[in-house]
Amino acid sequence: MEYRRSYVDGGSFFFTVNLEERHQNHLTTHIETLRSSVRNVKSNHPFTIDAMVVLPDHIHAIWTLPKGDSNYPMRWKLIKAGFSRELPITERRNNSRRNKGERGIWQRRYWEHQIRNEADFEGHLNYIHYNPVKHGYVKVAADWPYSSIHRYIRAGVIEADWGVADCWDGNCFGERRLG
């Protein structure tokens, strides 16, 4: 089945990329392997990481591609393959994956959304940075080590306590706060 994806040369996109087995923690346990895979792909196929958060079982990111380039699927394929090659084979693989020589680490598909304007960018940026709080890993977004929030704090764009007071009405960057 061919998915209808948005291809815009030089576009900005929000992504959610998940592990196949959502109870695994490969992404944070093997964070240096993931970082190396991303660096290798970026060096051969440049793109800008505007924001990114790595959780144990999934990644959220905003990328901007170079002018004249819309091939983010190839980049994700290479990142996933590079990461997977470095891990020992311990995952379950169905017959389809075995027959195709695929690993069973990543979900085959991922979510992509074309960023349309500044408000859309800001909303997805906030969602990315707040995600570790949403999932209960930390109480303050800046406490999560695998997030681009630290780059935004260093640049003075946001404060280290960002997100704490912003959820007073129960709406926390696209998510409802429980309790």
Image: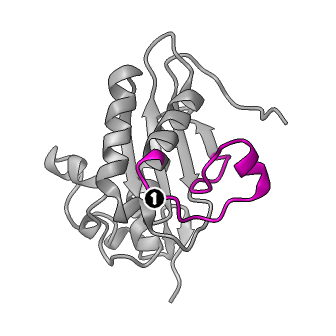
Residue 48: which quarter of the image?
top left
Residue type pointed to by label 1: Pro
Q: Is residue 126 magenta?
A: no
On the question of residue 147 being in view, the answer is no
Q: Which residues are magenta?
A: 85-110
Q: Is residue 95 magenta?
A: yes
The answer to whether one can see residue 38 in this image is yes
In the displayed structure, 152 sits above or below 49; it is below
Say which residue appears at 19% left-offset and 63% top-offset.
160
Q: Residue furthest bottom?
A: 179
Helix, strand or loop at disc 1? loop
> Which residue sits at x=23%, y=67%?
161
Specify whether 172 is left or right of 143.
Answer: right
Q: Position of residue 78 (x, y in %)?
A: 50, 34
Residue 42, image x and y in percent? 36, 28
Q: Is residue 111 above or below residue 166?
A: above
Q: Nearer the viewer, residue 44 or 86?
A: 86
Q: Where does residue 127 sit, x and y in percent of width and height?
A: 47, 57
Q: Which residue is mark 1?
A: 88
Which residue is at a point 46% across and 45% down the rendered structure image?
Answer: 85
Display colour scheme = one colour
Tell me where residue 40 appears, x and y as whole percent.
Answer: 34, 32
Q: Is residue 41 left or right of residue 113?
A: left
Circle 1 residues within 10 Å: few <14, some 14–19, many ≥20: few
Camera-side residue: 50 or 45?
45
Q: Residue at x 45, y 69 (%)?
A: 25
